[in-house]
């Protein structure tokens, strides 16, 4: 049920949303339920050893996700391939969104790499570059071109999906933590510069969510710490005041709020959505 009627008819572009049961799909579902028209994007195919086909939203899966969301919500949801590392593609997808729907009101920078986890002393430069590229360069390029369109329209909303890792470090995640810390910095500078154009820019910082990627992370960190997955998750629940890991719907709800009129005076923020696990 829609909670923000002002989002009816708004046009949203979401990156990294082509995988089933991912954060991007959850955000797309919520915005569709609010009445938005959604352009769902993902890379579509593998790109080098750092982005294997098992870790990306393929053209086929992305099309299936978009069709499933449209059928489930009755909304308009289309899929477009987008490699966020390629500026020409970013510019073309923004233009294609405007050509199809006449405008662009919301950008959600959700594309990210969270599976290249290694100790600092073992991480390859190419792996570092891939994580920083998708997680930070991609958000910069998408924000740049989406904001140009929004400024021409008189305003809009940009929501960056950061992480608890944007505020607190954890082992084996030097590149990931660096990229998410950087994304909060980008959020703040963009909020300063784009406020004059009527554009708010905020970040959402979820804690662990067991998506497909999250399930891989559970197995990886459980093995690295000598625990079963069940014990790893039990220990996680024990340190979260609200007693459970995050859900995709939690991040989606925060995103919808930041796109709504209730958040019209909120910009430059990095909103914790962590059940109290992240307190600062």
Image (cartoon, grey):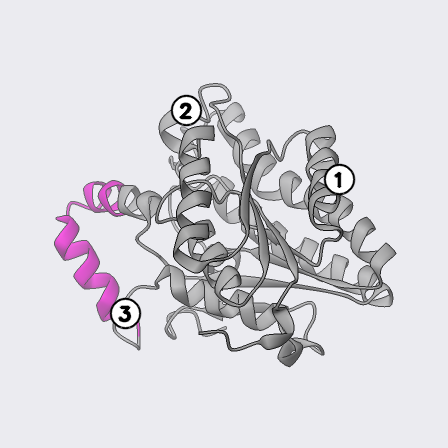
Viewer-side label of 1, 2: 1
Residue range corresponding to the magenta coloring:
218-240
104 in magenta: no
Residue bearing the label numbered 2: 52
Q: CA distance from mark 1 to mark 3?
A: 45 Å
Percent of width and height locating residue 157: 69, 62
Viewer-side label of 2, 3: 2
Percent of width and height locating residue 275: 37, 73
Q: Secondary structure at mark 3?
A: loop
Q: To which quarter of the image does residue 82 belong?
A: top right
Viewer-side label of 1, 3: 1
Q: Secondary structure at mark 2?
A: loop
Residue lying at 68% horizontally and 37% vertically, measured from the top left = 93
Percent of width and height locating residue 58: 44, 30
Residue lying at 53% horizontally and 31% vertically, measured from the top left = 43
In the image, residue 131 above or below residue 139? above
Answer yes or no: do the residues labelled 2 and 3 have beta carbons within 8 Å? no
Residue bearing the label numbered 1: 95
226 in magenta: yes
**Apparent side of residue 176 relative to residue 122 in the rendered image (left or right):** right
Please name whichever residue, 224 or 105, is drawn nearer the observer in this view of the structure: 105
Q: CA distance from mark 1 to mark 2?
A: 28 Å
**Apparent side of residue 219 relative to residue 43 in the rendered image (left or right):** left
Crowding around mark 3 (Cα neighbors within 10 Å: few <14, some 14 to 19, many 20+) is some
Percent of width and height locating residue 133: 60, 35
Crowding around mark 2 (Cα neighbors within 10 Å: few <14, some 14 to 19, many 20+) is few
Residue bearing the label numbered 3: 239
Q: Secondary structure at mark 1?
A: helix
Mark before the other along the chain sequence, 2 or 3: 2
**Apparent side of residue 272 relative to residue 260 in the rendered image (left or right):** left
């Amino acid at each position: 049920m829609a909670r923000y009627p002002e989002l009816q008819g708004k046009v949203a572009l979401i990156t990294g949303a082509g995988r089933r049961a991912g954060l991007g799909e959850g955000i797309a579902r919520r915005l569709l339920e609010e009445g938005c028209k959604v352009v769902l994007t993902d890379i579509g195919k593998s790109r080098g050893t750092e982005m294997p086909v098992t870790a990306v939203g393929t053209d086929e899966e992305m099309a299936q996700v978009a069709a499933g969301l449209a059928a489930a919500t009755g909304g308009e949801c289309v899929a477009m391939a987008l490699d966020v590392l390629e500026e020409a593609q970013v510019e073309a997808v923004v233009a294609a969104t405007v050509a199809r729907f006449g405008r662009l009101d919301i950008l959600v920078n959700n594309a990210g790499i969270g599976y290249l986890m290694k100790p600092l002393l073992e991480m390859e430069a190419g792996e570092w570059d891939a994580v920083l590229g998708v997680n930070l360069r991609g958000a910069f390029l998408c924000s740049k071109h989406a904001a140009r369109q929004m400024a021409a329209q008189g305003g809009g909303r940009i929501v960056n999906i950061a992480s608890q890792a944007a505020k607190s470090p954890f082992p084996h995640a030097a590149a990931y933590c660096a990229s998410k810390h950087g994304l909060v910095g980008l959020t703040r500078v963009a909020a300063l510069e784009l406020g004059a154009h009527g554009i708010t820019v905020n970040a959402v910082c979820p804690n662990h969510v067991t998506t497909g990627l999250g399930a891989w992370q559970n197995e990886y960190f459980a093995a690295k710490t000598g625990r079963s997955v069940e014990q790893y998750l039990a220990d996680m629940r024990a340190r979260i005041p609200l007693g459970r890991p995050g859900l995709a719907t939690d991040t989606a709800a925060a995103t919808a709020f930041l796109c709504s009129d209730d958040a019209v005076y909120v910009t430059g923020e990095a909103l914790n959505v962590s059940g109290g696990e992240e307190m600062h």
